[in-house]
Image (spheres, rainbow, N blue to C red):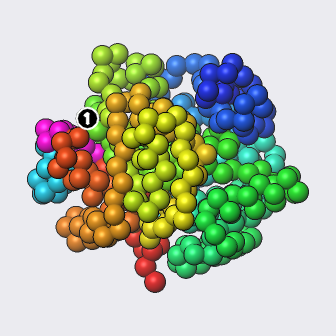
């Protein structure tokens, strides 16, 4: 294999990439992928999907790509919104254009591709919504059995989409943490592989392609800041990993100034924001999480240490947004820019304005805001 697996804590554990892997057996923390080669920027192909970066992804010769055409979503510059928010230039990366309506398509595509290559009997996942749709679609495309556990409060359009792909769907009382416990038990009993956020090493590899795309779409340059609505953390982690790889591999000049990674969460469920501002290395689970942005209703993200480390390495920030401000930001993206925004995207736009107003983000900054999903999934 052309990659190996390494513990994200630096405990020293490593393993070959052709073996089934979940968490580090030494410290039970997430694993990350390191490549045994440095792909050249010239290896980027003309494939109009994230597979244009195949040389930088964990797939071996002869293995099947489980793909629905994900990636290469639009990066839209919005001068009027830049003026309104108060920054020099503003782009929105619209991940709602992915095949399953969210950025989750990228990570679950990669997880299912590896599961198929490893000959696993089935896959399972807990979901706040979008990950469930993505796993259902890619499992169907791969002819792999799948079971999905979701909170009963998940928006009905999302549950309907999951059922439409013919997978097993189980509703649980409580939040995604409760769904996670049920998923872990099911995996233990059946041998299905649990592809929950950062509990396997490959979802982040799919997510990192967002970072490659931002750089390529900006003419192989980077913005001053990337604002990302964050629940579990894998999107933020993945983009930062891609930025490091591009500099290390020579895709970007060694003197490149890396962007500040800024996460946004709902005020009713902001464990990472709280931990960041308290200077903590990990997040304390949020009690009684509440927000209509269901993708942000993640009270105890397992990738907390990795996400917080990313923020500090990038000299980033973290901002919580009230429900009314999330709704206003969502409506602004839709009504002023024609983007079918999910509330998570509205949260990111609102947070950007708040950070400028409080002086934590420069008015001279160039900023990429992520809309991580389609608003259609939230309307019923």
Residue placed most toward the observer, 344 or 218 = 344
Vertical side of 70 occupied by 253: above or below: above
Residue 62 vs residue 20, the one in the foreground: 20
Q: Which residues are magenta?
A: 362-368
| Image quarter (top left, top right, bottom left or bottom right) of the N terminus | top right
Place of residue 16 in the rendered image (x, y in percent of width and height, measured from the top left): 74, 25
Dot 1 alpha-carbon crowd within 10 angstroms: few under 14, some 14 to 19, many 20 or more = some
Residue 88 magenta-highlighted: no
Residue at image position (34%, 49%) is 319
- Residue beneath the point at 23% across and 40% down: 360
Q: Quadrant of residue 282?
A: top right
User: What residue appears at the point 13 percent right and 50 percent down from the top-left corner?
Assistant: 86
Q: At 44% from the left edge and 63% from the top edge, which residue is drawn?
A: 268
Frontmost residue, 38 versus 345: 345
In this rendering, does residue 94 appear at all?
A: no
Work out which residue is located at the far bottom of the displayed protein and give it: 380
Q: Is residue 367 above or below residue 220?
A: below
Q: Is residue 227 left or right of residue 44?
A: left
Q: Which residue is mark 1?
A: 224
Along the line of sight, which residue is nearer the eye, 294 or 274? 274
Where does residue 179 sit, x and y in percent of width and height?
Answer: 68, 63
Classify residue 336 as left or right of residue 237. left
Q: Is residue 180 left or right of residue 50?
A: right
Q: Which type of secondary structure does the marked residue at label 1 adopt? A: loop
Q: Position of residue 21 (x, y in %)?
A: 75, 37
The answer to whether residue 194 is seen in the rendering is yes
Quarter of the view holding residue 12? top right
């Amino acid at each position: 294999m052309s990659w190996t697996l390494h513990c994200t804590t630096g405990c020293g554990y490593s393993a070959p990439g052709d073996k089934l892997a979940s968490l580090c057996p030494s410290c039970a923390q997430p694993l990350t992928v390191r490549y045994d080669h440095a792909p050249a920027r010239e290896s980027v192909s003309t494939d109009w999907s994230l597979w244009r970066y195949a040389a930088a992804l964990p797939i071996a010769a002869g293995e099947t790509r489980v793909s629905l055409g994900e990636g290469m979503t639009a990066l839209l510059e919005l001068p009027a919104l830049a003026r309104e928010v108060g920054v020099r230039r503003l782009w929105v990366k619209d991940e709602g254009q992915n095949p399953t309506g969210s950025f989750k398509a990228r990570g679950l595509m990669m997880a299912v591709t590896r599961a198929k290559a490893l000959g696993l009997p089935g896959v399972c996942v807990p979901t706040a919504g979008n990950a469930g749709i993505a796993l259902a679609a890619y499992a169907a495309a791969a002819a792999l059995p799948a079971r999905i556990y979701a909170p009963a409060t998940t928006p009905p359009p999302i549950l309907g989409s999951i059922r439409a792909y013919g997978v097993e769907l189980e509703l649980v009382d409580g939040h995604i943490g409760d769904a996670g416990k049920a998923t872990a038990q099911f995996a233990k009993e059946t041998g299905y592989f649990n592809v929950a956020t950062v509990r396997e090493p490959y979802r982040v590899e799919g997510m990192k392609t967002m970072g490659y795309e931002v750089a390529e779409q900006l003419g192989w340059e980077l913005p001053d800041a990337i604002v990302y609505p964050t629940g579990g953390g894998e999107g933020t982690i993945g983009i930062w990993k891609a930025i490091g790889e591009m500099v290390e591999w020579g895709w970007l000049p060694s003197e490149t100034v890396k962007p500040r990674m800024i996460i946004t969460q709902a005020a009713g469920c902001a464990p990472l924001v709280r931990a960041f501002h308290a200077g903590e290395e990990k997040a304390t689970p949020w009690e009684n999480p509440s927000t209509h942005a269901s993708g942000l209703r993640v009270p105890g993200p397992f990738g907390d240490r990795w996400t917080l480390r990313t923020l500090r390495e990038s000299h980033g920030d973290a901002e919580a947004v009230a429900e009314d401000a999330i709704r206003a930001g969502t409506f602004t993206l839709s009504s002023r820019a024609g983007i079918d925004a999910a509330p998570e995207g509205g949260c990111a736009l609102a947070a950007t304005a708040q950070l400028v107003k409080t002086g934590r983000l420069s008015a001279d900054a160039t900023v990429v805001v992520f809309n991580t999903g389609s608003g259609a999934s939230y309307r019923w």
